[in-house]
Amino acid sequence: MIYLFTWNSPYLIREKTLTWKNLFIEKNGEFNLVHFKDIVQIDNNHITETLTASGFMWEKKLIIIDDFPLSADKKTTQAQSKQDFLENVITHIPESNIVIFSSCSPDKRGKFYKKIKKIATKVEEYNTSWEQDIIAKVHNIYPNTISPDGLNLLIRYKSSHLEKVLSEIEKLAITKEQISIDDIKRHVSMELEESIFELINLITQKNIPWAISAFKILSSTTNIYALYNNLIANLRTSVYISRMKHLKVPIPQITSLLNLWNRGFLVTKSSKINHSELQSLYITLVSLDKKMKSWKLLWTEEKDFQFEIEKALLQI
């Protein structure tokens, strides 16, 4: 029997997997339990024997495999090779063996995902994209621990990642009976994604001095190339939204086409920068990458690259 626990909440996926694991141990003991936390490093012969051989004394066997099917950003050559290998093995798993694949945000276009979904006994999706889902889960685990406005800010700071939200509450609750919004502001740092969002907000409002100031602060704590790539990725979304609004595409259709989920409000957010200016900035920033890869920009230090990005912002 094959089960797939998936979608976009690593916390809920891991929680469900742990529940199955504990119930199996309680009923059957640990002897017929195998948990592959990094199956890429495991010998193929050992994997084949584990998946296809029945449990000791013909008892049921539980095999848990983390992070498969692969997400798009984890498709290294080695990981992809292991996934291709597993694709051939899973059709030979006996009914007495229970195999759980746990995977956060897998590549649903991949052959392995489609095959698992087709032959799995059950596919369970754990989705916490929407803010209300996260609030409900937090209230269930930490009732009356954090103020509503504090929780809303924390969710924003942690880019709606439930696991990170819970981790910050757990740390603050050690010394705080009631966590306030001021506690969040003083003790919790924004995720890079949220910081980038704030930076883009300053850009779209044409508050360039503050945008450059925010960019300098970010670049002092983040690798400049990682920062650049995140800026490009998020700015691309703003350009798409701007372009579609310019073409009079209906707002619900924009939200759906771009898979904006809990950031659908971006479509209706006011902006002082026009589409032409935003598109020009995006093209300028993208050209930096092209010039760098073609050796047309010979920077000696990261600060030179930072200067080029600041110069692009000044051109707005």
Image: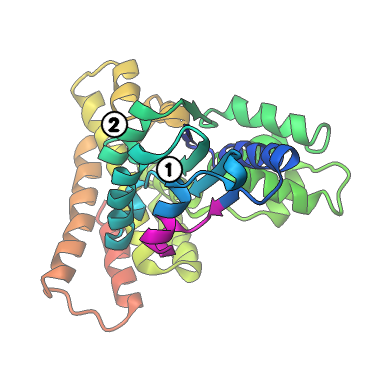
The magenta region covers 35-47
In front of the other: 211 or 38: 38
The residue sitting at the front extreme is: 57
Name the residue at 31% across, 30% down.
Answer: 258
The residue sitting at the bottom extreme is: 300
x, y (%) of residue 286?
20, 56
Name the residue at 12% across, 75% down.
Answer: 295
The amino acid type, in three-letter code, at marker 1 is Asn
Evaluate whether residue 67 shows in this view.
no
The residue indicated by pointer 1 is 201
Q: Earlier in the sequence, mark 2 or mark 1?
A: 1
Which corner quadrant of the image does residue 314 belong to?
bottom left
The amino acid type, in three-letter code, at marker 2 is Ile
Q: Is residue 299 left or right of residue 157?
A: left
Name the residue at 42% across, 69% down.
Answer: 223
Disc 1, SS? helix
x, y (%) of residue 190?
57, 52
Q: How many marks?
A: 2
Is 108 magenta? The answer is no
Disc 2, SS? helix
Name the residue at 43% across, 59% down.
Answer: 46
What is the number of the mark on residue 241? Answer: 2
| Badge nearest the viewer, 2 or 1 | 2
> Badge 1: few (under 14), some or many (20 or more) residues near its Cα, within 10 Å?
some
Q: Is residue 8 left or right of residue 255?
A: right
Q: CA distance from mark 2 to mark 1?
A: 14 Å
x, y (%) of residue 16?
62, 36
Asked if the residue under mark 1 is in contact with the one under mark 2, i.e. CB atoms within 8 Å, the reply is no
> Badge 2: few (under 14), some or many (20 or more) residues near its Cα, within 10 Å?
many
In front of the other: 45 or 207: 45
